[in-house]
Amino acid sequence: MNVSCANFKPMDLSMRSTADHRHMISWRLLSVFFLIGLLILAATVSAQDGRKLRAGYASLSGNMTPFWAAREAGLFKKYGLDVDLVAFPSGTEGMAAMIAGEIEFLAIAGSTTASAALGGADVISLGNTVERLVTSLMVNPSIQKPEDLKGKAVGISRFGTSIDTAARMAIHHYGYEPMKDVTIVQVGAVSSAVAALRGGRIQAAILSYPTLIRARREGFREMLDIASLGVAYASTGVTVRRSFMAQRRDVVTNYLKSILEAIARVKKDKPFAIEVMSKYFRINDREMMEETYEVSVNKYLKRVPAPTAEAFRSVLDELAQVNPKAKGQDPTRFYDDSILQELEKSGFINALYR
C-alpha cells in the first residue's frame, strides 16, 4: 500500500523521533552498563585468581615503610602474589577506592576504616602496624605558648583522616575546642602543609616524618609530639573488604605474610630500609632518613601488628565527637585478627627473627 507524505503529521514525526532517540539512548546505556559490568567482573576474577592485586597506601610517611619494603624485597612474589602499589593523597580517597572495589588492600588509619564501617561499608581492619599517632603539631615561631594557638588555623590533609584526628587531639590537649577555638583547614597532602605554613595560609600543621623534619629546618617549631602522649590509637594498619577476605582468605593470608616479613626485614636491615624510604620519598638526605627510620621503624613499628580493643576504643571515642553512631560501639567489631593469630601460633612470625 502506498502512503503519501501528506498522511504524516509533524506531531507524529516528533513523537516518533523522540521515541527512537530514547530507544537509542536506552540501548547505549545498557551497552555501557554491560561493558562496565564485564570490566568489574574481569577485575574481580583477576584479583580472586591471584594474578593481579592492587594495594593502596594513603600517606607518604615513615609508617608506610614495610608496605614499600614488601614490594622492593620481592616478598609479594615470594608468597605468590602479583601486586601493584597505588598511592593516594589521603585516606578518604583510598577508602573510596576500596569501597568501589578498585583495590583489594589498603594501608590506612583505623579511624578511616571505622568511620567507613559505621557508614555501612564492607571493610575490616586486619592489624595495626603502628598504634600511635606518629605526628607532631608544628607551628609558626610566633606561637610560643598554648594561649597563642587560640584563633589560629591548623592545617591537615583531609577531614576524617588520622591527621585530622591528631589535630583534634592536639587542640583538646591544650583545652580548646576544634573549629570553635582553633580552626582546622584542609590543605591536601601532608607535604602541601609546609607550603601552606610558609605562605601564611595556616599558622600550624599536623606533620609526619619526614615532612616535619623539613618544616623544622625551615624554622617552624615542634610544639607537641602527639605520639609522646602515649594514647593507644589504631594509626596505621591493613584494611580489606570483608567479602574479599571471606572469598579469598588464602590471598589475604599471603598478603599478611608479605607484610610481616617486610616488618622483620626493615627492623633487622636498617640500610635496606633507608634505601627504600629514600626511593619512595625521593630524598637523598641521609640525616633525614636516619631520623625517620629511628622514629617510624625502630621505635613505633610493631613486630606483631595485632589490632587491640584499646587502640580502636580510642578511635571510636574520637569519632563519637563528630559521629553519634560511634557511641557505645564494641571496638572488636572493626577488626579481625584471626589470620594474625594463626600465623603467630604457627611460629611463622618468630621464625622471621631467627
Image: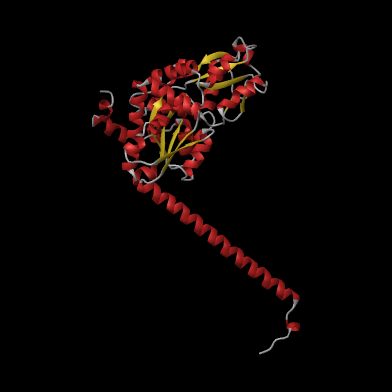
> In the displayed structure, would residue 43 be above or below residue 257?
below
- Can residue 235 be seen here? The reply is no
Q: Is residue 292 left or right of residue 264?
A: right
Most extreme residue toward the top is 144
**Residue 11 x, y percent position in the rendering:** 73, 74
Q: Is 295 placed above or below 253 here?
A: above
Q: Residue furthest left?
A: 346
Q: Residue furthest bottom?
A: 1
Q: Residue at horizontal 37%, vertical 24%?
A: 266
The residue drawn where x is 52% and y is 57% is 33
Image position, residue 137 (x, y; %): 55, 18
Q: Is residue 91 visible?
A: yes
Q: Residue at x 34, y 24 (%)?
A: 303
Task: State the quadrant of the N terminus.
Answer: bottom right
Picture quarter containing residue 32? bottom right
Left/right of residue 40 with respect to residue 21 in the rendered view: left
Q: Is residue 110 above or below residue 9?
A: above
Of residues 337 and 118, which is closer to you in this image? 337
Q: Quadrant of the C terminus?
A: top left
Residue drawn at x 61%, y 9% is: 144
